[in-house]
Amino acid sequence: MKVKLIIATIKPFKLEEVREALTGIGVRGMMVTEIKGFGSQSGHTEIYRGAEYAVNFVPKIKLEIVVASSMADQVVETIKTTAQTGKIGDGKIFVLDVQQAVRVRTGETDADAL
């Protein structure tokens, strides 16, 4: 059975809603990282203590989820519909093939390691 890595960037306030939706479809684990980045938004300006300054990187959450290939489309669709606000900066989703997965504790590999 093949395994896929899904990397998604989402708005921070959407994390809990996305996590609940993914758990609801059977996702058993994910890695979450707080990141900063920019895309079409390319940052914005803010005023701090009366001075205007550029914010070039926007706070985001990066999700990394490894699932059996058969689940990948459902995971992507769940993230897409749950994280979407319709505003710029909703994020991106990437799907990659995983060459090998190993559970450290047991030595199980690939789909068994998930």
Image (tube, grey):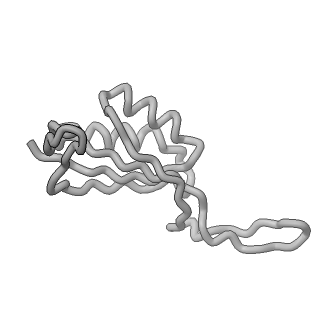
Location of residue 88 in the rendering, given as x and y in whole percent from the top left corner: 55, 57
Q: Quadrant of the C terminus?
A: top left
**Residue 72 visible in the shown view:** no
Location of residue 42 in the rendering, given as x and y in whole percent from the top left corner: 58, 70
Vertical placement of residue 57 versus 86, above or below: below
Vertical placement of residue 15 versus 91, above or below: above
Question: Which residue is found at the position 45% from the left and 47% from the top?
Answer: 32
Vertical placement of residue 91 versus 70, above or below: below
Residue farthest along the top direction in this orientation: 24
Question: Which residue is found at the position 28% from the left and 37% from the top?
Answer: 74
Given residues 33 and 50, the one toward you in this image is: 33
Q: Quadrant of the N terminus?
A: top left
Classify residue 73 as left or right of residue 14: left
Classify residue 60 as left or right of residue 6: right
Residue farthest along the left direction in this orientation: 1
Location of residue 105 in the rendering, given as x and y in whole percent from the top left corner: 24, 39
Label tally: 0
Question: Which residue is found at the position 53% from the left and 48% from the top?
Answer: 86
State which quadrant residue 14 falls in.
top right
Residue farthest along the front direction in this orientation: 105
**Residue 47 visible in the shown view:** yes
Question: Which residue is found at the position 50% from the left and 33% from the top?
Answer: 17
Vertical placement of residue 84 versus 53, above or below: above
